[in-house]
Amino acid sequence: MPRIVKPTELRAHLFEILDQVLATGEPCEIDRGGRRLMLVPVQFPRTSRLDRPFRNALNCTFDELVETRFEYEPGDLP
């Protein structure tokens, strides 16, 4: 069950409440005149550095990237 606090308590203990929400993962509700707000931790998926937006920028495999081929002979150059 989430902890319920009033805005004055939130103001007095903001950083402690934020740390508690992050540490426990339990949400905290703020009761403001009968209306409720909720502080919840956001769970970001763990990703490696390769799972960033530029991962598919080259549109090739790693082996294709490091492979070196020469389609011409050195004497073929003008």
Image (cartoon, rainbow, N blue to C red):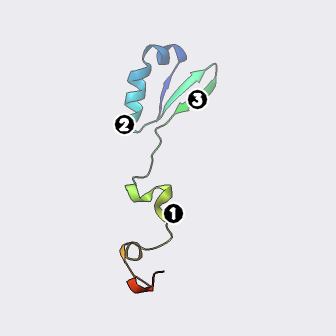
| Mark before the other along the chain sequence, 2 or 1 | 2
Residue 56 pos. (x, y %): 50, 65
Mark number for residue 76? Answer: none
Measured Cα–Cα span from mark 1 to mark 3: 41 Å
Mark number for residue 24? Answer: 2
Identify which amino acid the numbered label 1 is placed on. Ala
**Image-based side of 35 in relation to 74, left or right:** right
Regarding residue 10, the answer to whether it shows in the image is yes
The correct choice, above or below, for 19 with respect to 61 in the image is above
| Disc 3 residue crowd, few under 14, some 14–19, many 20+, Cα 10 Å | few
Residue 29 pos. (x, y %): 52, 29
Query: Are the two marked residues, 1 and 3, in contact with CB atoms closer than 8 angstroms?
Result: no
Q: Nearer the viewer, residue 40 or 56?
A: 56
Task: Tell which tag, 1 or 3, sits nearer the viewer.
Answer: 1
Q: Nearer the viewer, residue 28 or 56?
A: 56
The residue depicted at 54 percent of the width and 17 percent of the height is 7
Task: Tell which tag, 2 or 1, sits nearer the viewer.
Answer: 1
The residue depicted at 46 percent of the width and 61 percent of the height is 55
Which residue position is annotated with label 1? 57
| Mark before the other along the chain sequence, 1 or 3 | 3
